Each structure stands twice: as C-alpha cells, then as structure tokens.
Image: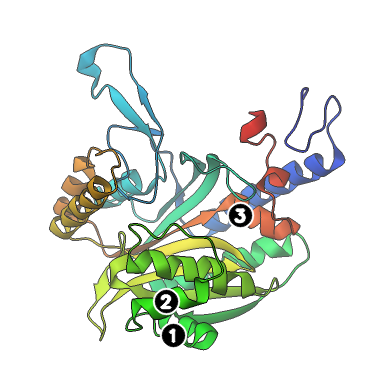
Amino acid sequence: MTGQSSHGATGRMADSLKVALHLRARLYAMLREYFAERGVLEVETPILSAAGNTEPNIDGFSTRFSGHVDAGAVTRWLRTSPEYPLKRLLAAGIGDCYELGRVFRNGEAGGRHNPEFTLLEWYRVGWDHQRLVGETVELVRLALQLVGRRAEVRALSYRELFMRTLQLDPFSAPLDDLRAPLRDVRIDEEGLSRDDWLDLLMTHRIQPGFPDDRITVVDDWPATQCALARIRQDDPPVAERFELYLGVHELANGYHELTDAHEQGDRFLRDLEVRRRRGLPQLPIDRQLLAALASGLPDCAGVAVGIDRLLMAMQGTDAIADVLAFDFAHA
C-alpha cells in the first residue's frame, strides 16, 4: 500500500493502521462464524437502488445510469442501508439472513462520521425486538473479547432514561422544559420539532454520560420516532424499537419490524411531506418494498450495527479515521 493513509502515514504502513486493519479482519471472521453457527444466511443485495431513503434526517448519494433506458430507472441511489432489499428477501421466504457491507450517507463527514461506512444488518424470523436485544448484546460482548475487554449491561426504557438523567418525562414535558437544559448550546431553533429537541437532549446531555465500560440498551421509543418499527398501544403509545450504546458510541438500532404495507406507505408519504416543508428533494418511494410487505413479510425483528463505530469503541478512539484504511479526505 502506498500513498497517504487516514493516519497520515506515507510509504510504509503505520503500525497503528496495521493493527486496525488486522482487528477489522478478525472481527469480520468472528461475525461470519457467529452467524454460520446459528444458521443465519449471509446475502448480498444491490448497492444501487431505483428508490431513495425518504427519512428526512438522512441524505443519500445519487448517480445516473448511462445505458439503455430499457434497463430501468436512470437515476439510482446508493443505499443508506440494506434494509429494504433484505426485507424483500424475507418476504420471499429466505429466512434468517444478514448482510455485512458498505453503505453511504451524504454530508456525514467528521471526527465520528465517514460518508462511506460498514453496516452489519440482520433479521430473525419469529423474534421480537426484546429477544433480538439479547443476541445483539452477546455479539458486542464477543467483539470486545477480541481486545480483552468486558462490559456490563444496563437496559432501560426511553422514558426511564430521561427521568433518571434529566428528571424530564419525554412524553409529557412542555417544550420549554425540553429546551432548558440546552440553553448553553448554540442551536438554530428554526423548524425544530419536539423529536428534534429530544434527539438533541440525547446527544448533548444524556449520551456523553454513558460509561466506557457499559453497554446501554434503550427501548420503547416515542411512537413519533418509529421509523420502520411497530407501534405498541401503551399509554402513551411507544415504538417497539431499541438502540444500543457502547460507552458514548451509538452502535445499533433495532426494531420489531412493521409488516403492514399500508402503514409503511403512509409513513413514506409523511416523510416526504416533512422533506417538502424543509425544502429537501422529493425521493422515489420503494414500491418494491411495499409490494413485498403486501405479499406477506413474516413476523420478524431486525437490527443494524455500525461496524466502524464498534471498532472505534473496541480501540478506544473517538476518531473514525483511526479504524479505516483511508478516510473520506484521503479516499
């Protein structure tokens, strides 16, 4: 390997980069062995899609196909996750499956972000999100063993987390009370929703306090933050969703998956309306996913784990460049 690495080394590979690349290879081998032993099939799905991700807080890359128009849609989107095609495979009857591969998100470059990164995503048929929490925790602990580390686990609901940390009920506190703990943070408040303020509280006031040697699992998120998760009609309703953190690093986002095609279509339309209000591009909805849901997606749970973030936590670094062969600036 020649040229300049993400570590700034030229010519001979820096020792720290060599260690990082060997650890990544060991982690990949461990993950594949883990799933093979449990009968979870590794698959590959397209990186280029005719549909975009309508999520308003995610910006995708697009490109244009120059071949014959009969080949399909000219504009193609680089996937932000493999979720939609994996669900199409599930609906076709493939059973438990996973993909370990590259995904792309525009505009996300910095100390902890790279526009091109590695995601592990897997689905378990007949499971709910709570059962999947246990497997996700087990996998993260096995990864930590590769570097001789251990971590305790703390699981609590979204509401419990806010009540214990900030003495605020995220479901009922007035908006002014949610703003108050963030008064010393420079924030452009124009257009911010209640969920935006809750996200800011999580990232600026709660998450930084998570201990390095702890896996924190947070479930039962607000129904307004359901994404592709089922909503359980509690009082108030909650999304059957969990997030897992290792120290301050958000590693995983998992759902008891929504199987209702009509509801999923409505959520896509709501996303597009939010994008319209924010002046963001309108993106093509994944009609093939909706057709797969309508044909019958089995009851399942799925989770995505950011591999680069996991490696950052394993190596004790806050710089994503430390775990990449070449970061975005040197790609």
Residue type highlighted by circle 2: Leu
Query: Please, what secondary structure does the residue beneath circle 2 have?
Result: helix
Vertical relation: 62 (above or below) 25? above
Percent across and percent down for residue 142 are 65, 64
For residue 270, say whether it is visible: yes
Residue type highlighted by circle 1: Leu
Quadrant of image for the C terminus: top right
Query: Dot 2: within a 10 Å radius of its alpha carbon, few (fewer than 14), some, or many (20 or more) residues?
Result: some
Judge by depth and name the residue closer to the eye, 204 or 97.
204
Query: Dot 3: within a 10 Å radius of its alpha carbon, few (fewer than 14), some, or many (20 or more) residues?
Result: many
Q: Name the residue under label 3.
A: 309
Q: Distance between the residues labelled 1 and 2?
A: 8 Å
Residue at screen point 47% across, 66% down: 200
Label drawn at residue 168: 1
Q: How far apart are marks 1 and 3 (CA)?
A: 29 Å
Query: Please, what secondary structure does the residue beneath circle 3 have?
Result: helix
Residue at screen point 70% across, 73% down: 213
Percent across and percent down for residue 197 are 41, 68
Residue type highlighted by circle 3: Arg
- Marks 2 & 3, CB-CB < 8 Å contact: no
Vertical relation: 254 (above or below) 10? below
Residue at screen point 22% across, 42% down: 285
Label 1 or label 3, whichever comes before in sequence order:
1
Query: Dot 1: within a 10 Å radius of its alpha carbon, few (fewer than 14), some, or many (20 or more) residues?
Result: some
Q: Is residue 132 left or right of residue 205?
A: left
Quadrant of image for the N terminus: top right
Label drawn at residue 178: 2
User: Closer to the camera: disc 1 or disc 3?
Assistant: 1
